Image (spheres, helix red, strand yellow):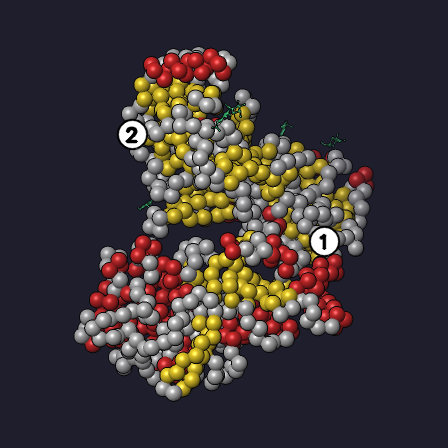
Amino acid sequence: MDILSFMFTNTILLILFSGIADGIDVFTSSQSVSDGRTLVSRDGIFELGFFSPGSSKNRYLGIWYKKIAVKTVIWVANRSNPINDTTGLLMINRKGNLVLLSRNNGVVWYTNIQKGVQSPVVQLLDSGNLVLRSENDNDSETFLWQSFDYPSDTLLPGMRLGWDLRTGLDRRLSAWKNSDDPSPGDFTAGVELYQYPDIVAWKGPNKYVRTGPWNGLRFSGAPMLRPNSIFENGFVWNEPEVYQVYTVKNKSLISRYMLNQNAYQGQHYIWNEKAGNWMMITYIPRDICDNYDRCGPYGSCVSTEVPPCQCLKGFKPKSSQNLYTMDFNPGCERNKPLYCQKGDGFIKYVGLKVPDTTNSWVNRSMSLKECRARCLQNCSCMAYTPTDIREGSGCALWFGDLIDIKLVQDGGQDLYIRMSASEVEPKGNDKVKIAVTIPIAIFIVAGVLLVSCYICSSRASSKGARENDVINDRNIEGQREDSEVQLFDLALISKATNDFSIDNKLGQGGFGPVYRGTLVDGQEIAVKRLSRSSGQGLTEFKNEVALIAKLQHRNLVKLLGCCIEGEQKMLVYEYMPNKSLDFFIFEKTRSKLLDWPKRFHIIGGVARGLVYLHQDSRLRIIHRDLKASNVLLDNEMNPKISDFGMARSFGGDQFEGNTNRVVGTYGYMAPEYAIDGQFSVKSDVFSFGILVLEIISGKKNRGFYNPGNGLNLIGHAWDLWKEEKAVQLIDPLLKESCNLSEVARGIHIGLLCLQQHPEDRPNMSSVVLMLGSDTTLSKPKQPGFLMERKSPETDSTSSKLESSSTNDISMSILEGR
Ligand SMILES: *[C@@H]1O[C@H](CO)[C@@H](O)[C@H](O)[C@H]1NC(C)=O
Ligand SMILES: *[C@@H]1O[C@H](CO)[C@@H](O)[C@H](O)[C@H]1NC(C)=O
Ligand SMILES: *[C@@H]1O[C@H](CO)[C@@H](O)[C@H](O)[C@H]1NC(C)=O
Ligand SMILES: *[C@@H]1O[C@H](CO)[C@@H](O)[C@H](O)[C@H]1NC(C)=O
Ligand SMILES: *[C@@H]1O[C@H](CO)[C@@H](O)[C@H](O)[C@H]1NC(C)=O
Ligand SMILES: *[C@@H]1O[C@H](CO)[C@@H](O)[C@H](O)[C@H]1NC(C)=O
């Protein structure tokens, strides 16, 4: 039918057909869905209708979650063909096809079913599937058409990714171009129908990531997709069909897997009802070793190694002077050539993602022994593995060079690689080898790092000295556990942060602005540009950073490395998606997301992080600037202390006991520190006490104003405590979720930390014990700083040095945000 006649019918239909009533899940050939109306699945889970993505004015027909506040579209009809008016109409035409048309754009989309249908109906199912079926047949196997067969960027539980070989249907995902444009972007993902099928994501025409083939239990190279408590992946691989599908264990959990155009292309989310947002639970690519063919033939990528490309045992780097770059790696070659006719053997390598399966051969009923024999028969067969690792049976063979092998730390499988008989000893028996040892071209990598060092640290010291320095450092490093800190190339950091664009700025900390960035491998980072030169030399700075990078604890933000360019120094941290604690607790709507159990968890986590800093780490760090904005939150709302070691390394003039420049934040400083510049671990304990009161009350100590008596939050808490009404301090939003005795204990511990005299305050390990037990607590003495004091205007967002006078003692405050 041509467009004109469609247009003609359209006009007629507009008059003849009646619109559907709202809230209905099914319509017939005498009804239609117009722009503004929606179809709602029976239990109200999904909704179909017209929408405009992001800031676009175009209209699309799509399906989204009805009950979820964050509009999340899971399917779009003909994504590259938008409607530019509001006359869009979805209906069933005379031939029983589903048709989408509009006045301006004519036929935008239609289902191309050839066979005629008796009384067709369209129904939106609670699974998110839009189906066209005949009225009295609702068997999913005989649907005439279903949206699940034409995925957009989202895979829902029960949806199939892959092939129906009977019809040649290949279901693939493709990412949206951007949030304003659902048309297909660069990334697609689907099942590659080699003899040994593999799940692949492509960027344009090129392979980008492989999960590795299914091995009966999981995907060889994607341990995070193995069965777990939340979801279960399956792979159907039989005559008419080859597809991946996943199910969620708890049917009330809302889950989706999507292909994203930007970092972490494959993302699995579940809806977090309490927090009101989507929580990413797994993603791929995971690390640089997931990038397709990172290391060339017979190279094995080991993400924890520097350099990551290693040769499999029995192989050596192909060229001693090859360039180690992102795009090109010539890989490895055999130490000893194969002599097929004289007989080769096999070496078993454990824990690998098996190689690219383009040239593979499979027989799933063979035993492993038969498999080996079969591979030996053919001189171009290079490796074999069982296709089902549960029973160690089935046979997959590889022909030609083996590429895209990765060492999978917590998963992977065995691969038997053909080797010269002389490599395999004792005679005839196959040998088990750990996968890798010899790094590829370590000198070359040293060279590349050297270059980045050049870029980062220009003008710092004399050229010759620096060269030697770095080479020496690097040579030992490959073997050393406690490696030197990673130096990031300035160009890399610039690229990652869009040239430090304002859009990437996350905020302004006490020591300089912080930017968000994404490295080429997809890792998200936060870059802190230290705004003040500490006058430290390059070596001292690097040493300091190295020391701090070694501080690793689950409640500390991880420092990944640094970048140095002349006077400009930068610290590179892991990125924390949920911002900082102050972003949540001091804001009405967001504070609802942190119920009492979460807050108690955060208090405990911060306490444990401080214990580590104060006594368990090698350095014994006093934080000196603990505050809500320095407590960052990860995906699961675990607290991570940031900016530790900053005062020690980059702020203070002196490090021991007494300083004449006070580094810290007004409202969190212990009295002895703010007034006398005396600091100790007990000054951190004081700041922790304030943090506890803030977390419980949802109010800032600074800015808390009690008109009656001029008391600050501490004073207010102390008054309530004396009147035995301490629990009145609690944030009203917490009332429902809280455990009053826990809250009371929290306030009690907070007040113990806030005592005037440092020697009265508990140390942090006692605090952790007190938080975790029911022991009787001692009575707190009067806290320090009961009254709101006059202070310099410190709410500005920029870092600045200001002076004020308290008790005739001059002090200056370096103020954070
Ligand atoms: C809408 O799209 C049609 C077909 O693509 C085009 O001819 C028409 O000019 C567009 N109208 C507007 C207002 O953009
Ligand atoms: C989608 O729109 C294009 C025009 O942009 C058209 O050629 C194609 O047939 C449409 N696809 C379907 C399934 O209707
Ligand atoms: C399918 O059909 C049966 C009987 O014809 C009916 O009871 C059932 O509710 C239908 N299911 C759906 C999803 O329409
Ligand atoms: C499933 O999830 C819901 C809501 O998240 C929860 O209330 C329920 O207890 C869970 N059921 C099981 C069996 O875990
Ligand atoms: C697969 O292996 C089994 C067992 O060795 C054999 O019987 C069967 O013929 C093989 N199938 C093919 C297609 O080679
Ligand atoms: C070895 O396997 C390759 C690839 O399957 C095939 O092309 C070749 O004919 C085989 N050679 C022998 C001798 O069977």
Q: Residue at x 44, y 72 (%)?
A: 815
- Mark 1 near ligand 6 (CB under 8 Å)? no
Q: What percent of the width, then of the height, locates residue 753?
A: 34, 76
Q: Which residue is mark 1?
A: 324
- Quadrant of residue 763 within the rendered picture: bottom left
Q: Residue at x 48, y 39 (%)?
A: 180
Labels 2, 1: front one: 2
Q: Quadrant of the C terminus?
A: bottom left
Query: What element does badge 1 sit on?
Result: loop
Q: What percent of the width, then of the height, locates residue 498?
A: 57, 53
Sequence order check, earlier mark of 2 and 1: 2
| Mark 2 crowdedness (10 Å alpha carbons): few <14, some 14-19, many ≥20 | some
Q: Is residue 675 left or right of residue 217?
A: left
Between 301 and 152, the one nearer to me in the picture: 152
Q: Is residue 373 above or below residue 277?
A: above
Q: Is residue 697 left or right of residue 428?
A: left
Q: Which residue is mark 2?
A: 23
Q: Is residue 35 above or below residue 2?
A: below
Q: What residue type is disc 2 on?
A: Gly
| Mark 1 crowdedness (10 Å alpha carbons): few <14, some 14-19, many ≥20 | many
Q: What percent of the width, then of the height, locates residue 373?
A: 70, 37
Q: What residue type is disc 1 on?
A: Tyr
- Specify whether residue 153 is in view: no
Q: What percent of the width, then of the height, locates residue 347?
A: 69, 48
Between 568 and 717, the one nearer to me in the picture: 568
Q: Residue at x 28, y 65 (%)?
A: 697
| Picture disc at residue 553 | none
